[in-house]
Image (tube, helix red, strand yellow):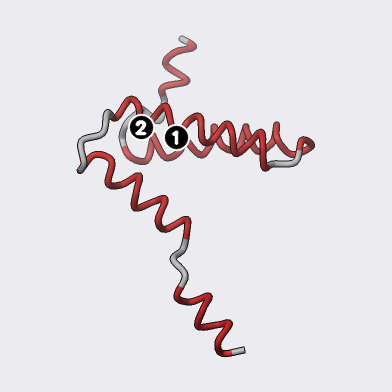
Amino acid sequence: MRRVQRGTAQRPDPLHILAQTISMTGTIGMDPYAVLGVLVEGAVQTLVQHIPEERRAETAVTLIELLKERLEASGAIDAGADDQQSD
């Protein structure tokens, strides 16, 4: 049991590695527009290939809401941007 726990603890966390890799893209000089394109495509492919069909629509809406919330929280877009566009 301890050997299994040690083995699991020693394995790198794939999500942590992915987050670090994404964070490093600016540092290593990658084209930010290409990075955004790859991230969007990754989100779409994950949704289509790994989310059950009956949950895709709800998950897609949640993904869009989360993206909007994060962009607003970071100051990248105005919180009232949707309201201003419909005026």
Instruction: Give the residue type that dot 2 points to.
Output: Val
Task: Indicate whether 86 appears above or below 78.
Answer: above
Q: Residue at x 44, y 34 (%)?
A: 39
Residue 32's place in the image compared with 82, above or below, is: below
Q: Is residue 57 left or right of residue 41?
A: right
Q: Residues within 10 Å of mark 2 (few under 14, many from 20)?
A: some
Instruction: Give the residue displayed 42% in from the left and 40% down from the top.
Output: 70
Residue at left 35%, top 44%? 22
Q: Which mark is residue 5?
A: none
**Percent from the top left, x then y, of residue 7?**
51, 78
Measure how far apart labels 2 and 1 are at the Cα level: 6 Å
Residue wearing tag 2:
35
Q: Circle 1 sits on which residue? A: 39
The reply to whether dot 2 and dot 1 touch (C-beta < 8 Å) is: yes
- Most extreme residue toward the bottom, as rendered? 2
Q: In the image, residue 41 lies at what x, y percent?
A: 51, 29
- Residue 1 picture location, percent across and down: 62, 89
Give residue 10's position: percent from left, percent from top: 45, 75
Question: Quadrant location of residue 30?
Answer: top left
Identify which residue, 85 or 48, lies in the foreground: 48
Q: Residue at x 33, y 39 (%)?
A: 74
What amino acid is labelled 1 in the image? Leu
Label 1, residues with CA under 10 Å away: few <14, some 14-19, many ≥20: few
